[in-house]
């Protein structure tokens, strides 16, 4: 299967690249130079990179391989969401609005928001990847 960005945008709850850039910019502005927030962001990035790798390889796997790896992928995705929520909680304690987190949505409100969070997680890994030249 050949994937394109245009195909992605037709999916439910897909977020445009420009929107992901805006969300990331807002997130980083709220983190600023706060050492605790930067540490939480670093932990998020570690799990985000792991998740993005799993997700990027997903379409290349056979059905059997997907069945074998599905629980690990779910666990990693849950960890990503937990790390987003930890960062959000901390920033709110510091008086930040964390509107960027609301923009990603919560899976309790709509299960598709889980996919949106996963999409944004891949964006974060992309940004790190292209900056690691």
Image (tube, helix red, strand yellow):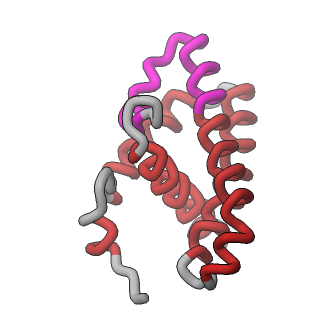
Is residue 88 visible in this depiction of the protein?
A: yes
Q: Position of residue 66 (x, y in %)?
A: 64, 73
Q: Residue at x 61, y 77 (%)?
A: 57
Closer-to-camera residue (81/69) = 69
Residue beneath the point at 61% across and 80% down: 63
Residue range in magenta is 85-105
Q: Nearer the viewer, residue 63 or 115?
A: 63
Q: At x 71% / y 57%, what residue is drawn?
A: 71
Residue 48: x percent and y percent?
64, 53
Q: Residue at x 42, y 88 (%)?
A: 1
Report x, y in % for residue 59: 54, 79
Vertical arrangement, residue 91 with respect to residue 112, above or below? above
In the image, residue 5 lies at what x, y percent? 33, 73
> In the rendered image, which quarter is residue 105 located in?
top left
- Looking at the image, is 65 positioned above or below residue 18? below
Farthest-out residue, bottom: 1
Chief SS of the magenta region: helix
**Residue 102: which quarter of the image?**
top left
Q: Is residue 28 magenta?
A: no
**Quadrant of the snapshot with the C terminus:** bottom right
Q: Which of the pair 100/127 is nearer the observer?
A: 100
**Image side of residue 40 versus residue 120, left or right:** right
Q: Is residue 89 magenta?
A: yes
For residue 18, say whether it is visible: no
């Amino acid at each position: 299967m050949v994937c394109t960005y245009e195909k992605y945008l037709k999916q439910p709850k897909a977020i445009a690249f420009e929107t992901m850039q805006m969300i990331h910019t807002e997130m980083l502005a709220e983190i600023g130079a706060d050492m605790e927030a930067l540490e939480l962001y670093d932990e998020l990035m570690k799990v985000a990179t792991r998740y993005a790798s799993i997700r990027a390889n997903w379409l290349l796997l056979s059905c059997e391989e997907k069945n074998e790896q599905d629980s690990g992928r779910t666990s990693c995705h849950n960890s990503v969401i937990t790390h987003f929520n930890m960062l959000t909680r901390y920033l709110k304690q510091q008086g930040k609005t964390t509107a960027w987190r609301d923009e990603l949505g919560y899976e309790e409100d709509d299960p598709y928001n889980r996919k949106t969070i996963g999409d944004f997680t891949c964006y974060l890994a992309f940004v790190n990847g292209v900056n690691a030249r």
